[in-house]
Amino acid sequence: MSLMQRASDKVNLSDKILKWYDHNARILPFRTHPSDIKNGLRPNPYHVWLSEVMLQQTTIKAVIDYFHKFIALWPTIFDLAAADNDDVMAAWAGLGYYSRARNLHKCAKLIVSTYDGNFPKDAETLQKLPGIGPYTSAAIASIAFDQPAPVVDGNIERVVTRLKQIATPLPDAKSEIRAYVEEITPQKRPGDFAQAMMDIGATLCTPKNPVCGFCPLHQDCASYKVGDMLKYPVKKPKAEKPHRYGLAVIVIDENENICVEKMPEKGLFGGMYVFPYTDQLKQKFSVDKLVNKKDIHTNIHNVSDCHHWINNIKSIINSDDIEDVDKTVENELTSTSNKYDSLPTVKHIFTHFSLDLESVIIRQKNISCGVHQRLVPLKNLEHIALPSLMKKLLKHLQTYMAAQKHSEELCLT
């Protein structure tokens, strides 16, 4: 095939994609429809950036409500840059991958302080900003500023691997896919082209049931011609996720204030609030089995730092030789100790492991919190930056506390 013919085929391909997009573009709150662009309306770079950061490893369905929330709270990048970090983290809570929220806030501040609130237009400069990698920088450059940067997300990977029958497994095939997308990305309307390719992947060239007859590329698709679309993209076998056991300590005072701890900026749940917990137990925690251990009992009644308490629990439960205290001490503790309740097991799947999280509830007067810990009224816990795992635990806690109140009311009648 001559170079002229190849160039003609690429133009023909991009024309088909853009023509399809003009009539089938999804209506999304952060997108400027092609008909509006033709009438002179330009995409809002702030909206494009915000949505693309949210869409990293997250579905559009999950993102839409969060996008509306952020735009309502912080209509401009200046508003977001001036926001309190805890407020940003609280608004992000539940969306996952919390480093994105921290970088989002850092990026907003940097764009305001360094670029007077104006986003850089080229992908290379954008990629130097916090939280913006190769994909996000290309998406912002092409969609917001019509720069012909090759945009490749998971949907586009699927479309291209089927279109060209790329047998190289992902992620090794990424460079080959990107090179092809770069070839076919047009100089005119590259932003619409990128979004069109995403829409084709999301609505037609789907993972399990592709709707090939309606796809503008089916006549050009190598895998469609032989009917092996479901073979692509080829992926390397996934390693089995390790399973962990964990324990959360829920300390409640007489006024229903609960101790929570702010996590370090780096690491899992960075900058979020959690009930003090560990996810490093070697076995499932049992309140009934271990509550009368002398060390645990002593720590429960001398709560000054919940994380210190959890570390003691962790060392005891992970020891190779866990023995009951002698019967005399056990009887003494049983006669004087409180009943320590637990909540239902919370099961959660992270990117790299799955977790069964147990809990122990401690009713304690005059709680003295440790470093990075604070007391929050039960009724206010929904409004702080709790990650999804802790929100699951909170729902169980709310049910438990409601049952306790109901039981107390029955006793008074």
Image (spheres, grey):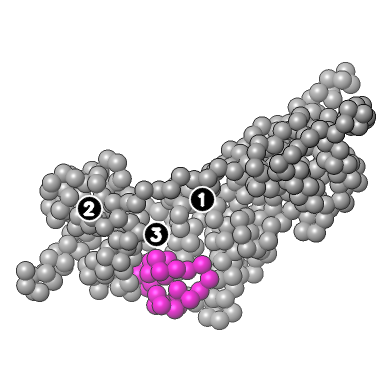
The magenta stretch is: 120-145
Mark 3 sits on what residue?
31
Q: Secondary structure at mark 2?
A: helix
Dots 3 and 2: beta carbons under 8 Å? no
- Horizontal arrangement in the rendering, residue 85 relative to residue 309 (left or right): left
Judge depth for marks 2 and 1 and give the one in front.
1
How many numbered marks does the figure carry?
Answer: 3
Residue drawn where x is 62% and y is 63% of the image: 266
Residue drawn where x is 81% and y is 33% of the image: 324
Residue drawn where x is 31% and y is 45% of the image: 207
Label 1 crowd bin: few (<14), some (14–19), many (20+), radius 10 Å:
few
- Quarter of the rendering occupied by the C terminus: top right
Res 134 → quadrant: bottom left
Q: Is residue 223 visible?
A: yes
In this view, 99 is above or below 360: below
Say whether residue 132 is magenta.
yes
Mark 2 sits on what residue?
162
Say whether residue 373 is magenta.
no
- Quarter of the rendering occupied by the N terminus: bottom left
In this view, 168 is above or below 203: below
- Horizontal arrangement in the rendering, residue 408 relative to residue 69 (left or right): right
